[in-house]
Image: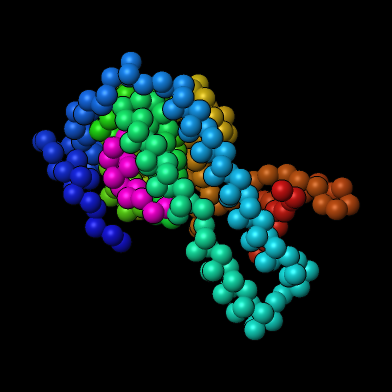
Amino acid sequence: MHPLPSLLLALIASGPAAGPFEVRAPSPSPGPALATRDEAALQAELDALQSEFEAAQEAFYAKLRELYAPFGEREPSPSEAAELERKVQELYAQDPSKSFAPRFAALAGKAKGSVVAARAWLRVVSFGRGGDVDVEAAIATLLAEHLERTELAELASMLAYSQLPPALVQGTLGTLRTKSPHDKVKAAATLSLAMTLQLEDVAKAKELYRELIAKYPALDAGWGGTFGEVATRALFELERLQVGMLAPDFEASDENGVKFKVSDYRGKVVVLDFWGFW
């Protein structure tokens, strides 16, 4: 785990105690007046850079698929597996995120203070530590200069699956859910924080899911329904579907169309095989 950069440490330490899941952001630093910029041109530049990255990423994935193609129907031999691993590692050294992250960061600096800058910094964060840019500093900039923007709902969502240090992730989500002026950002941050806490603090995670159900029952989560619906399913999983719990009963039909219930097999060893095509 890399030490947090001084800017993040300053954010965490500034001011009175901010609570266990909050990073205090300093007042936004004023950038050049937006009137002096052509924001439309900056957005077009960001769009072009994003399109260029997506093309490079698709080419990268095509090469990756090509490496695995000979083994679609069989397992590679030990020597083939070793050679495949070597080639895969060589290819990952050419991951386009490494070269594109600095370009997005440069554009963010050029567009400082604008919504284009926020969107460019979000692209940097999406690369994680795979990009050759200090992602912790990118997050700090988003908190310091763009905390009022609705775009930070995307930051909240991506942090749920981040490999960044837990203290940084939880602190950032705490700030977003308490300091953002937008319900969508607060709800997204609350959901992500609950997801990150499920393995270490189940009681706190349940509390956050119940908070979502109470405060944002009908707010669209952008995937999987409303925040209330997503939280209800997650809460059901924590309370009813954990190892050692009695499985909920349900009815299904076997291959001959005969209906059965899981409870019919209570006291016996049951293997459930869920499968499909995606």
Residue 208 visible to an observer of this rendering: no
Residue 90 visible to an observer of this rendering: yes
In the displayed image of the protein, which residue is found farthest to the top? Answer: 35
Instruction: Tell me which segment is drawn in magenta.
Output: 131-142
Residue 205, percent from left and from top: 38, 42
**In the image: residue 250, left or right of residue 113:** right
Q: Residue at x 76, y 46 (%)?
A: 252
Residue 36, percent from left and from top: 32, 18
Q: Residue at x 76, y 73 (%)?
A: 74
Based on the picture, tell me whether residue 137 belongs to the magenta stretch.
yes
Residue 2 location, quadrant: bottom left
**In the image: residue 13, left or right of residue 148:** left
Based on the picture, tell me whether residue 41 belongs to the magenta stretch.
no
In the displayed image of the protein, which residue is found farthest to the bottom? Answer: 79
- Quarter that holds the N terminus: bottom left
**In the image: residue 83, left or right of residue 217:** right
- 106 over 90 or under it: above or below: above
Q: Residue at x 10, y 36 (%)?
A: 16
Residue 62 location, quadrant: bottom right
Q: Nearer the viewer, residue 228 or 87?
A: 87
Residue 14, percent from left and from top: 13, 39
Magenta region, main secondary structure: helix
**In the image: residue 180, left or right of residue 161:** left
